[in-house]
Image: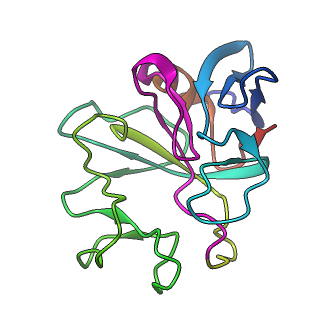
Amino acid sequence: MRMRLKTLRVLVCPRDRRRGVLVAGAIRVPCALGRAGGRLKWREGDGATPLGVFGLRRVHYRADRIARPRAGLALRRIRSGDWWCDLPDDFAYNRLVTHRPPPAGSQEWLTREDRLYDIIVEIGYNDRPVVRSRGSGIFWHVVRPGFTPTAGCVATTLEAMQRILPMVGPRTRIRIG
């Protein structure tokens, strides 16, 4: 059995809080953070990457684009029609929805064209319990070219994700800040 990491650390860059370094044991990789930087998250859509310690829930991946990732977390194929609810008034707020189309105003489709969600890891932010309007859909996902900021997620290269995911498990935590 492979050794599982207890903690992934995201060190926020003091000069540009929209960037950081993800540390996984001896591995250190650059990462992009939210457009408002790493800070306390107060509301939906604020662009902040939340500071704190969070669990890692599941790995979702695009089987039509990449091979099944090696990971110590539960794996789930992303299907056409999957979306993440970011509407605070919806009963499914901050949850994966697979059984109905999104109401007007939700843009968090998991089948993106830009490849950012070829692999996503759910970060357990605001999910146990869910607090309306506190923020939703905080993921570890694939970074944009140039490491431009995210909407509040942590993003690394696909290669870094594929290298680190086999070392994480259900007890691994991510410490941001």
Taking depth in this image into account, of 177 and 97 the one nearest to the observer is: 177
Which residue shows up at 40% across the image and 20% down it? 145
Against 96, residue 36 (above or below) is: above
Q: Is residue 77 left or right of residue 131?
A: left
Residue at image coords 29%, 34%: 115
Report how many numbered discs are placed on residues in the image: 0
Residues 23 and 153: in front is 153
Residue 37 location, x and y as percent?
A: 69, 38
Residue 161, x across and y down, in percent: 50, 27
Q: Is residue 143 within the magenta segment? A: yes
x, y (%) of residue 72? 55, 40
Placement of 116 over or under 128, stated as above or below: above
- Residue placed at 69% from the left, 77% from the top? 129
Task: Verify whether residue 167 appears in magenta.
Answer: no
Q: Is residue 142 above or below residue 137?
A: above
Name which quarter of the figure residue 103 lies in: bottom left
**Residue 51 horizontal side relative to residue 84, left or right:** right
Quadrant position of residue 105: bottom left
Q: Which residues are magenta?
A: 133-160
Q: Where does the image place residue 45, in percent across and percent down from the top left?
A: 56, 59
Quadrant (top left, top right, bottom left, bottom right) of the N terminus: top right
Q: Is residue 74 left or right of residue 46?
A: left
